[in-house]
Amino acid sequence: MKIDLKNKYTIVLILTVSVLSFMSAIIILNPYAQGPRSNDADKDGIADEDDNCPVVHNSDQSDVDNDGTGDLCDSCTDTDGDGYGNPGFQTNTCPDDNCLSIENSNQSDADHDTIGDACDICPDDPQNDGDDDGVCSAVDNCPAVYNPGQNDSDADGRGDSCELPPLANLTYLPVGPIHGEMIQFWDTTTPGGGILHYWRWNFGDNTTSSEQHPTHSYIFVGIYPVQLIVGDVNGKTSSITKNVTVSVNNPPYEPTITGPSLGIAGVSYTYHFKATDPDGNQIFYSIEWGDTTSLQTLGPYTSGDEAQGNHSWKRPGRYLMTVKSRDTHNAESNFTPFTVRIPLNIYLLDPVFIRFFEQYHQILFFRLLDP
């Protein structure tokens, strides 16, 4: 049989390719032909021989204490290597460490604050440094407020940062002042933690004072905001402002006088006085009886209320009584005159006869009887 040379080469090529394909399949399918194969039991993408915790998925390979055992498999994650574990690791079976960064196998904690003495900046103070100012609470003069300087201006053992400020207050009299009237102001501040040592008054009319209890008067009527600022030795301040209303004061009206105008020497008579004040102020009555007795003052009375005075004249004569009203701001009315006659021997006459002549025949009657 004659074989075509061209077909012969084709057959050889086909056989060669077939043999190579068969051998490749055998290599691929045979695990021993590929060499030893790696395992990953926890499926975290890290071969078991390289995994620091091959039985628990831990792709981050966390190992806080660098002991080669991953934290999720470590029965005692112990940073400082003292046999006590870092708190917070669920797999720990060892006791928690009270000082993570410093080896302290004795776990000494003198103040029982759960912070080991090796790490405790205040080993004898269970409150430690609550305000983080570097001063232990037991000796901190203001343990709740950050005050590293421990300033204590009044040396009372309480830091300035914890001292209470004063509570400013003021009062004044008279309550309803008038222009030109002197007003007394008082500082009635409630002190805080320190002694008050300065006062600053502003009277609202461009005048000031540094006295504790100053006086002041206003030239013009108006409403003035009076401010008081107080400060203590600890540097604490407080202020208050009150409006002071300054008004115009009108004097009271002239008083009326009622009472006998004819009398007997040595007999006491009652007289009534009455006036009103347009501003509603209380009223005093100043009485000159017209003889050698001194000025008599009655009051104060509410505006419109009647006052009463008693007087007797020792000798016969004609006496000019004068009365004026004055309010609590010392504004005065004009005098009201009232004449009282004490005739000679008037006690010998019948009272009806006296009243008749007093009303209808005064000129003749008193020409005859007056001294």
Image (cartoon, rainbow, N blue to C red):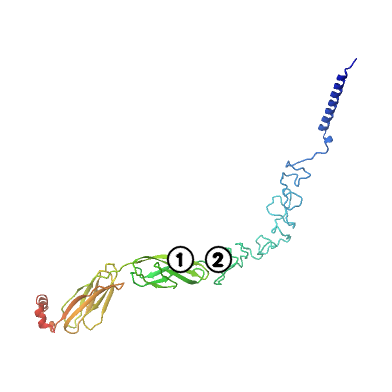
Residue farthest to the front? 6
Q: What number of labels is visible?
A: 2
Dot 2, how many residues are within 10 Å of its Cα: few (below 14), some (14-19), or many (20+)?
many
Amino acid carrying label 1: it is: Ser
Q: Can you say which quadrant of the picture contains the C terminus?
A: bottom left
Amino acid carrying label 2: it is: Ser
Cα distance between the residues tagged 1 and 2: 19 Å
Q: Which mark is residue 161?
A: 2
On the question of residue 349 being in view, the answer is no
Q: Which image quarter: residue 361? A: bottom left
Residue farthest to the top? 1
| Disc 2, SS | helix
Q: Is residue 187 left or right of residue 62?
A: left
Q: Which mark is residue 239?
A: 1
Depth check, mark 1 against mark 2: the one in front is 1
Q: Position of residue 242 (x, y in %)?
A: 40, 65
Q: Is residue 285 left or right of residue 46?
A: left
Q: Is residue 352 above or below residue 79?
A: below
| Disc 1, SS | strand
Q: Residue at x 27, y 76 (%)?
A: 298
Q: Position of residue 112 (x, y in %)?
A: 66, 62
Q: Is residue 12 left or right of residue 231?
A: right
